[in-house]
Image (cartoon, rainbow, N blue to C red):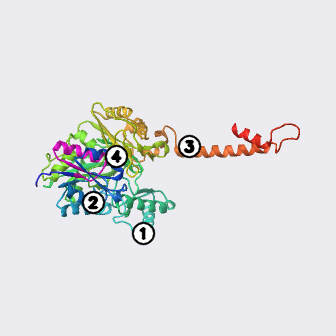
Amino acid sequence: MPKIRKILIANRGEIAIRVMRTCKELGIPTVAVYSEADRSALHVRMADQAYFVGPPPSRESYLVQERILEVARHAGADAIHPGYGFLSENASFVRACEKAGITFIGPPASAMDAMGEKTRARQNMIQAGVPVVPGTTEPIATQEEALAYAQKIGFPVMLKAAGGGGGKGMRKVEKTEEFDSAWRSAKSEALNAFGNDAVYIEKYLDKPHHVEIQVFADQYGTTVHLGERECSAQRRHQKVVEETPSPILTPELRAQMGEVAVKAAKAVNYVGAGTVEFLVDAHRNFYFLEMNTRLQVEHPVTEWVTGLDLVALQIKVAEGEKLPFTSTVPPRGHSIEVRIYAEDPARNFMPSPGKIQYLRVPGGPNVRDDSGVFAGFTVPNFYDPMISKLSVWAPTRAEAIARAQRALSEYVVKGITTNTRYLKAILAHPEFAGGDYDTSFLTREHTVLLGGEDPKLNEVALLASAVFAHQRDQKRAKTLPQKASPGTGGLSAWRMSLRTRRR
């Protein structure tokens, strides 16, 4: 296959910049696309060319396939890197690229069909003999059918979007009474995020670990895994902290999971970078969860311990090159990544868009900040609030935790609120330090991680204070004179009321 001459990055923010950096090192020109909200974005400034693709909502800009392909043709880009999210797991877009003679830097549409749609992936894995979490193998058509199935396998259950991942369109349901609202919100969120409102059901495992295996395959049948990532520090099913190696895996379990991940990728003739995700229960049994047919947000930790550039590998495999290795690359040391969000943990993690007035990012040995913002940039409210990924490497896990804490202490962002203090609290928590934390860790320790302040309790306290003040004022009003006594020169009830309120 011919060498790629120019790459359009069909994404925004830090991942677009991440891809551009590798392209510059490889000597490949880049093309950026941007919405109205991203006119001044960093990825627009860094690209060799940049093209406007529509209004701020992603469904009117970054997700419009025809517009992205039109830009590629106009700019002379012969390849498209999708990053993650948006069109990265859209098989129809892959086919449209092929039809237009443009190289899609990712897996073939057939593999995406097999694994990108979660229920189909479960069917394929069952046929391949891979253990899966109990649940449906097809999207469920109606709420009534879904509820009946949930009652059959027993609560709690997980409602999950069939057409995508990243925590979108996912709801845990504890009981029948919660099912109606969870069903509607899961379908609505799935439609907004992926353009597909199909939902399926899985049995919820108690206190599971979320462990994923990075796989890579070339076009000549070589498929290897590059170790695992522990992703159990999650809030609302969205990963917040990731690390590798996983502190709970033994060498034997790591080998078993790696073997199954490779088997899963080979079963669908996978090519490129992919991630096979598993749930590991308290007895260290593991179950296939899903396969993300793209580059992951947390790929830097794998790059730290392997010394590989996964984006460069993606490009070279897309050009038809063979993988430079035929077996697992032994990991070296330990790496941790934390996600910096423009959000306010003290206000129930409400997004905090706005203008960044001052920005100081951390540095020092073995510290990496993948960011898409700068001082003066206005963080829009139309997209995911993640503004950067901070990752570190150290010889041991304890040293990596200490380095991540030090790096976070150097991170200064003014003008918007971020979750850096919350991240430091996670790293300092004894359960995280011990290494045996599960996917309910952040929910279970919510109050502690917020410094003892629970937003819901604060709301209750405010309401109680308001009720108390109202009752106090009513009591005082009853004891006030109704009018001034004639000839005494006393204050009127009206003036006494004003004076009382001023106290």
Secondary structure beneath label 3 = helix
Q: Residues within 10 Å of mark 3 (few under 14, many from 20)?
A: few
Sequence-wise, the earlier of marks 3 and 1 is 1
Residue, disc 2: 67
> Which circle's residue, 2 or 3, is located before the other in the chain?
2
Q: Which residues are magenta?
A: 8-32
The numbered mark at residue 458 is 3
As shown in the figure, which amino acid type bears the numbered disc 3? Asn
* 3 vs 4, front mark: 3
* Amino acid type indicated by mark 2: Arg
Residue 194 in the image: state x and y as whole percent: 34, 59
The Cα atoms of the two marked residues, 2 and 1, are separated by 34 Å
> Would residue 440 be found to the left or right of residue 26 on screen?
right
Chain-order first, disc 2 or disc 4: 2
- The answer to whether the residue labelled 4 contacts the one labelled 1, judged by CB atoms less than 8 Å apart, is no
Residue 231's disc is: 4
Residue at point 29% right, 30% down? 364
Per the model, the C-alpha gap separating discs 4 and 1 is: 32 Å
Q: Secondary structure at mark 1?
A: loop
Label 2 crowd (10 A; few <14 / some 14-19 / many >=20): some
Real-space Cα separation, disc 3 to disc 4, in angstroms: 30 Å
| Residue drawn at 33 percent across, 49 percent down | 39
* Camera-nearest label, 3 or 1: 3
Q: Which mark is residue 142?
A: 1
Q: Give the CA distance from mark 2 to mark 4.
A: 35 Å
- Looking at the image, which is closer to me, 229 or 186? 186
Q: Position of residue 139 (x, y in %)?
A: 36, 65
Q: Magenta span has 298? A: no
